[in-house]
Image (cartoon, rainbow, N blue to C red):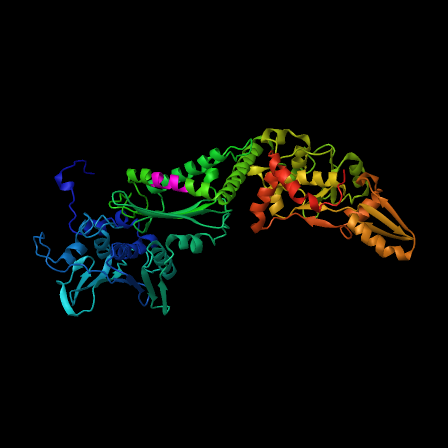
Amino acid sequence: MNTRYTAEDITILEGLEPVRKRPGMYIGGVGKAGLHHLVWELVDNAVDEAINGHATSILVTLHEGGQAVSVEDNGRGIPVERHPKDKEGRSTLEVILTTLHAGGKFDHGAYKTAGGLHGVGSSVVNALSSKLVARIKREGQTWEQTYKRGKPLGPVKPVGPARGSGTTIYFEPDEKIFEKVEFDAELIATRLEVKTYLNRGLRIVFKDESAGTRKEFQHQGGIVEYVEQVLIPRDRRPVIDRIYSLERDDDKEGRFELALTWTEATDVALHTFVNGIPTADGGTHEAGLRDAIGRAVREYIDTHDVLPRGVAVTPEDIREGLTGALNLFVHEPQFQGQTKEKLNNPEVRGFISAAVKPALETFLNQNQTVAHSIVARIIQSARARQASRAAVAAVKRKSPVSHRLNLPGKLADCTSTDPAESELFLVEGDSAGGSAKQGRNRETQAILPLRGKVLNAEQANDRKVFANQELTDIVSALGCGLGKDFDQSRLRYGKVILLMDADSDGHHIATLLLTFFYRYLRPLVDGGHVFIARPPLYRIDVGKETYWAADDRQKDKLVKKLGKKGKVEIQRFKGLGEMPPATLFKTTLDPDHRRLYRVQVADEDRLVTENVITELMGRDSQARFEFVTTWAHEVDELDI
């Protein structure tokens, strides 16, 4: 091994040799992403012509066999005359296609803004192609030059007259460089359509000769339409009925277009672009946007004092469900790496933040109905996060393997260990619990009596919720844990049934339990595991026939109908504890005769449900007062 280090060890790569030697440095790799990056480089050059007002349409063709692509625009056309500073007397076209860092985007004379600023795009494509043909239309003449692996096979030559102007680059990627030369038509089409959202009015046509298809993209709605058509339909139901949009144009800083909304999704879908190029890793423009959104929303919350007591909002809560797009145009973007996936310009963060924050804050203040929906979504996120964190610290999940261990002492468990057939009845009071225990099917039905009215989980903080004996008994019996510790596979009962008296107190207890399940065990609600039993309030006897009525309205209807048969005897149950065990089983526990209501929240009703629970079960009594005064006229009788 030679340990000497001399001048002879230094290699000088000339022309495009560095690209072929280390292609990953320029296109990120030689797999599928790197292969398609060649297309993006040429398309970006064509889009730059459009951004600066010199082109209106682009044609991208995937040629027969799927191993060659051409990109054509109707821009000015690359200059073909001799370059004045080239000592070899080569044409400007050849200089651009064979020299790294040669192009018209290093100053602002030819391009005000551009996606490709390193001057390596076209030359890299040339270097990594086994064949490349450049065809230029300028000043009534068509010029052509052919290359092989980055080297010209001859000078640029006129090949005939031309109408209009523009540039067409045809290339065949080098099979010696890439792992596999096979373009993905769907991927190309998707990327091209995004370009037309980002550049209103730009027309891009994509032809796939192998499939015999032709697609034309043109979107006048810009990025607002992009958010509506592309981002929101992906299972991201918006919580507000309009998309917020903003445009700013500053001669010094640049210009941007912004469109955003909040959805019911739990992740963030924020797509950012710089001069039409997607920045998958974000950068300073995305950081500035996040700063602005967080500060504007928090300012609104503080100004209007809309945050419930005990709820602490973090930046992550504000951004949860955020969906939008930011398209920034700047004079000299500083990208991290040639693949341009992250913007590094430090001044951009302040520019975006200073422009978006006051505009968004004004929008929220002027559209308080929209702002209220956004804040409700944020509060929902904060509560879910707090509940999850507290649950992990306070409750250990129980495993079905230890079916008999660590269960509440007052739980009358069933003998089956199969959740698919096991049911847990949460019963109001020890008296009703006693009747239920005697009347149940011991093999599949478990009974857990609850004492009095349980804690209101909406008004209590997490510490009080997890210190409450009744609620922790429920969690222990279920065995599936809470929050991040929740594991549905450990759920011990396929049905969780709320069994309360049929009077107003029973309805109140059921509402308190539903609030707890919705706030702390929502996966059980979403999974269809929670039910409400509807026991009868009245027993009606006519001769030897017995009927059951769930409420006064049903009782009156039955009495009117049965009065013709003879004397009607009516018994009103003060509570489930008054029912004989056999009667309770027949009317309420028996799967063949009982009536159960599955608790479900449709996707379109989630925000409404959130608001109802917040207003009617929360600390703010004003919302309940307004509810009572609004609906009191429809109440015929109060059961006090």
Span shown in magenta: 352-360
Question: Which percent across, then down, holds residue 417?
Answer: 69, 43
* Quadrant, the C terminus: top right
Q: Residue at x 15, y 55 (%)?
A: 95
In-image side of 589 versus 134 (left or right)? right
Residue 176 can be seen, yes or no? no
Question: Which percent across, then down, holds residue 631?
Answer: 67, 44
In-image side of 629 versus 81 (left or right)? right
**Quarter-of-image position of residue 444:** top right
Q: Nearer the viewer, residue 480 or 508?
A: 508
Question: Which percent across, then down, holds residue 447?
Answer: 74, 39
Q: So how many labels did they put on this image?
A: 0
Per the picture, the main secondary structure of the magenta-coloured stretch is helix
In-image side of 550 versus 196 (left or right)? right
In-image side of 270 versus 439 (left or right)? left
The image shows residue 479, relative to residue 265, as above or below, that is above
